[in-house]
Every structure is written in structure tokens, then in C-alpha cells.
Image: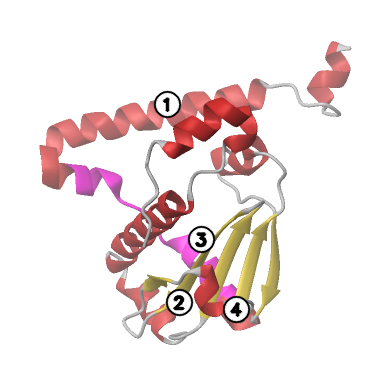
Amino acid sequence: MATQSPFSFAQNFFAQGPAALTPPEWALDELQRRLVLLLNHVLMQEPQAMARLVQQKGRLLKVQWMQWHVQLRISPAGLFEHVPLAAVGDMVDLQLTLTAANPWQVLQPLLDGGKPDVQVQGDVQLAADINWLIDHVRWDLEADLARIVGDVPAHMLAQGVQRMVQALRQFAGSVRRPGSANAESAA
């Protein structure tokens, strides 16, 4: 099997310009696997979430934004497994498609404490369970940091992150969007 050089992405980027922003397949696969590890880490801290997912074991979930996607199968333990696209094809139980055209439209609702616009296709009960997870499961980053660096530094880092998020929310609220009241009053 031929191995692709990790430097080919950089070579393609400089040769093709911004059109080459799609990373190589191996990098996307590894990023998806890391995402699944993070999701499972967060889920393992919430036994009620895992209990909900156990009821949906074996079901396949696909999350997509533009040309990027990740497919997850729910394991018998109530966690997620990464499933390559070629392994399943179109046999998904639930597909969630982010409808925003650019990253800012995805991040804006998240910064405001909401959810981005999502098109839902598939099983209603699985969609309800995934929505429950999104509404109720939170990553306790401070507790994870405390295991590594101690309680006081973790608390200080968490406060710094909270201040940055608050600043981003204020910035997002002050950005003038076309068609918004702020943009019309400025004109």
C-alpha cells in the first residue's frame, strides 16, 4: 500500500492556492477518530447519557457540513464508534446536516448559547436522543485540566477561557450583519 507524504498537503496548497484547503483523506480520518475519542470521554462522565444511547445501539448517525462529514455507530456500551463512509454507504439511521454556508454562521449561534441550523433526516427517536445529549451533556474541562495541572491552575485557565468566550460573544453581538438593524441604522 502506498503511503502518502504528510508534506503533499503543503505542496498542493502552494501549487493550487486556497482551493487545496481540503486536507488529505488520512488526516480527515485521524481527526474524526480524535473527535470520537473526545465525544466518548465526555459521554463517559454522564451515565444517564450512556444509558440513553444503549437503547439505540447499532444505529448509525451521520453529521455533515458542506463536503465534510463524520459517521458514528452507537456501541453496545452507549458510546460512539467511528465508521468510515465507504463501510456503510447510504445506510444511515439519522443524518444531521449543518445548513450554514460558512463557518461564521455555524459559530455565531454557538457563541450566543444556541444551536446552528440543522436539517434532520431519519429516525425521530434517535434524533430526540441526540438532541437530549446536545442539551444536557457538557464537558467539564476544568475538572479534566485539574487532573493534569492541579485545581488552582485549572481554575485560572477556565476563567481565562470564559473571559475569551465572553469577549467573542460581545464581538459577535457588535458585528454588523447585512440586513440587521445595526447595518440599516449605520446606512
**Mark 4 and mark 3: span between their CA atoms?**
23 Å
Up/down of 47 relative to 6, above or below: below
Observer-side mark, 2 or 1, equals 2
Residue placed at 71% from the left, 46% from the top? Answer: 100
Q: Check residue 128 for magenta coloring.
A: yes
Mark before the other along the chain sequence, 2 or 1:
2
Dot placed on the residue nearer the N-terminal end, 3 or 2: 2
Q: Main secondary structure of the magenta part?
A: helix
Question: What's the amino acid at mark 3?
Answer: Asp
Closer to viewer: mark 4 or mark 3: 4
* Gap in angstroms between the C-alphas marked 2 and 1: 34 Å
Q: Nearer the viewer, residue 46 or 84?
A: 84
Q: Which residue position is annotated with label 4? A: 92
- Identified by mark 1, the residue type is Met
Q: Report which residue position mark 3 lands on.
A: 135
Q: Which residues are magenta?
A: 127-145
Please indicate whether residue 63 sits to the left or right of residue 10 in the image.
right
Q: Is residue 138 visible?
A: no
Q: What kind of residue is marked 2?
A: Arg
Instruction: Estimate the x, y position of residue 68 in percent, counting from the top left.
Output: 58, 53
